[in-house]
Image (cartoon, rainbow, N blue to C red):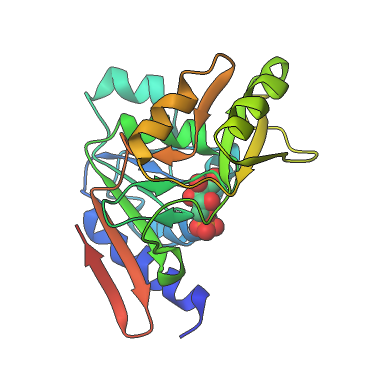
Amino acid sequence: MTQDEMKKKVAEAALAYVKAGTIVGVGTGSTANMFIDALAGMKDEIVGAVASSEATAARLAGHGIPVMDLNEALTRVDSLSVYIDGADEFDPGLNLTKGGGGALTREKIVAAASDSFVCIVDESKKVEHLGAFPLPIEVIPMARELVAAVASKLGGTPVLRSGFTTDNGNLIIDVHGLKVTDARALEDHLNSVPGVVTNGIFSHQGADVVLMGTPSGVETIR
Ligand SMILES: O=C[C@H](O)[C@H](O)[C@H](O)COP(=O)(O)O
């Protein structure tokens, strides 16, 4: 089975977590795109979807799935029923690295507004410790050098994502070579630096369930 076929299988398996009559949070990236395509078949059963990026909003709308603003959604319900999204890495504690596509901040917000997070990945995303994938940090432009210096002090190599601006008008610094021994402590430490909007470690907003595509089928990891 190819990587794309594995992604498609987990995207389809995630439909089992979508409850009729609810508002669904939808992530960003190639795996999330496959989920959106699958969700199109259920568009008449859900109230709508909250998108974690402009790209996701456009794809949802292209399928005729009602796209709702998060603030509007939260005036109608206390929380979204489920958030479904991919990841760049996941560890055995279901902590994630996200933001390879630069959508980490809106993804973390929508995940935080949801009752549960179902993460859909192929088996290449499984790691013992986060850190093999460069850690994205969204920064306000003025704080670029300050945040880069903090990342260097932690032993990482910060690289500005060239020519890239987030949906929020900010920059992304990708930090290579960080040794992540305590995902939550690193997430909190980086988020405490003034000018950091958020970083790509999802420990507070880690997955409740990971659906992992393998050549022999979909594995459910809790
Ligand atoms: O900003 C992008 C997101 O965090 C994605 O969930 C992540 O990069 C995984 O994307 P893909 O499913 O394309 O591997």
Front-most of residues 213 and 16: 213
Residue 192 in the image: x percent, y percent? Answer: 46, 18
Instruction: Give residue 122's quadrant in the image.
Output: bottom left
Name the residue rendered at 39%, 64% in the picture: 126
Asked if one can make out residue 204 in the rendered structure from this viewpoint, the answer is yes
Residue 38 in the image: x percent, y percent? Answer: 40, 62
| Image position of 59 with respect to 47: above or below | below
Front-most of residues 218 and 65: 218
Q: Is residue 25 left or right of residue 100?
A: left
Q: Is residue 48 left or right of residue 152?
A: left
Residue 52 in the image: x percent, y percent? Answer: 48, 37
| Image position of 222 with respect to 191: above or below | below
| Image position of 189 with respect to 172: above or below | above
| Image position of 211 with respect to 116: above or below | below
Front-most of residues 45 and 166: 166
Name the residue rendered at 24%, 29% in the picture: 79
